[in-house]
Image (tube, rainbow, N blue to C red):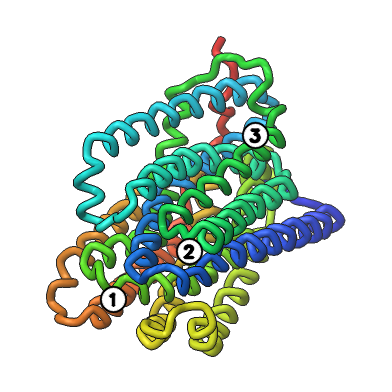
Amino acid sequence: MNKVPATPKESHHEKVSFFRQSGWLMFANLVTGVLMWAIHFLSKRIPESEYGLLGTLFALVMLVPILPLQMVFAQQTAKALASGQQAQLSRMIRRSILALFLVWLVWAGIMAVFHKQIIDAWQITNPVALWMTLLCLLGALMLPVLWGLLQGKQDFFALGLSMILTGAGRFGGAVFIVLALGGYAAGIMSAVALGFLLAVGYTAYASRELWQAHGEPFRARELLAQVLPLMLGFGACQFLFTADTMFVKAWYPEETHAYVAAGTLSRALMWLVLPLAAVMFPKIVHSTARSEKSNLLAVTLLGTAVLALCGALGLWLVGPFVVRLVFTPTYVEAATALIPWYAGAIVPLALANVLINNLLAKGDFRPVAWLVILAAGFALALKFTHSTLDSAHSGQVQVLQIMFLCNSVFLTLCILFTWVWKPAPKPSEASVLRPIS
């Protein structure tokens, strides 16, 4: 089916709407990021070992496929609303949430059986930190599903407000627990769980018309054929974004705090530009389902490039001052030395994120297998090269150099699949959520 071009008036309205919605999400991301980042001011009130543990527990929660889950449900919601299949969507949502809860029960059982070994390996002094992390894992499974519903129906105001609630609950609870009650990592993880609770409650209410509706059967096998590539593709992106901290903690358990500090500031670059791709994604899904043309990719890519490059430059310039302001003096020098490497590794990932969002929104799953191979290669490269260096700083720099190389390959693949290796034309496909006849 031929694409229907948008009129100049429609194109102008689309751009205005895009920048207004992106602007709100960027503001929400900024507020949320400040609230979450402000927790690190508390690093001066807790032992360095507890702060290193806290970074590891944060990274563990970040390894939950939050981004893949959100994008799967954003894609299915946008497609269902564009094709009038809300009843099938409602049943899919309820069954998916039940399945994720069962997955969490399996995690809880594994953690219950091996909790002593985990506590010893990570040098956890208060076991409550582990159990609060388990509750955070449940929130990390449920929240992206609900965020995906709001993103898919393009309710970006509620999505941004939910994000702010996550940060507000986390920061407010952490300040009270650490300053008033004298808590350490366990107390801060309890505050993180509170943030998840607030956000899940509000988001479930804001999306209730989607998951409470009368459900109808849908074609589960055809749905799985679309969900699996989305999960793998966005899962590989998230692995490239988060896995480095887990490796560093395993190799340099006594010197993780500087790396966590540099990573906290550098990852802010991704949180700055992610709203652009988040707004673009459901619009591309919607326009693809209705065979409409859109030029949002160029707008989104240009905005992301400008913000990411300016953000990286600003971080290189002011990062040392921010580190001295927030973190303890003992690892200011080490964290400052890592920031240029970390920020440089994030920039190609930010650009690649826009392109992979565009490809997967259009149902072009050709890059997925390559991304999975790349993520596996990233893990293997980290595993077999760190032992060749004798200092923690050199090893951490090497991790970031490998991260930059892999992210650059990721960006190159996305460029090739977007503009060079174009897919063969294919007829428009019906929604997998259509009723079973």
The circle on residue 352 is 2
Kindly identify the amino acid type of the residue bearing the numbered disc 2: Ala
Number of numbered callouts drawn: 3
Residue at image mark 1: 396
Q: Which of the two residues, 121 or 379, is positioned nearer the viewer here? A: 121
Q: Which residue is depicted at the point 46% across and 58% down?
A: 183
Looking at the image, the residue that sits furthest to the front is 181
Name the mark nearer the viewer: 2 or 3.
3
Q: Amino acid at mark 3?
A: Ala
Image quarter for residue 335?
Answer: bottom left
Q: Earlier in the sequence, mark 1 or mark 2?
A: 2
Residue 244 vs residue 356, the one in the foreground: 244
As displayed, is residue 289 above or below residue 332?
above
Mark 3: secondary structure: helix
Reading the image, the residue beneath label 3 is 204
In percent of the image, x 44 and y 31: which residue is there? 100
Image quarter hosting the N terminus: top right
Give whichever of discs 3 and 1 has the lower sequence position: 3
Q: Is residue 230 visible?
A: no
CB atoms at circles 3 and 1 under 8 Å apart?
Answer: no
Q: Quadrant of residue 290?
A: top right
Foreground mark, 1 or 2, reads: 1
Tell me if mark 1 has few (under 14), some (14-19) or many (20+) residues whose alpha carbon lies within 10 angstroms of its own. Answer: many
- In the image, is residue 28 above or below residue 272? above
Q: CA distance from mark 1 to mark 2?
A: 23 Å
Name the residue located 34 percent from the left edge and 52 percent from the top edge.
126
**In which quadrant of the rendered image does the C terminus lie?**
top right
Answer yes or no: do the residues labelled 1 and 2 have beta carbons within 8 Å?
A: no
Q: Position of residue 412 (x, y in %)?
A: 41, 67
x, y percentage for residue 200?
A: 60, 39
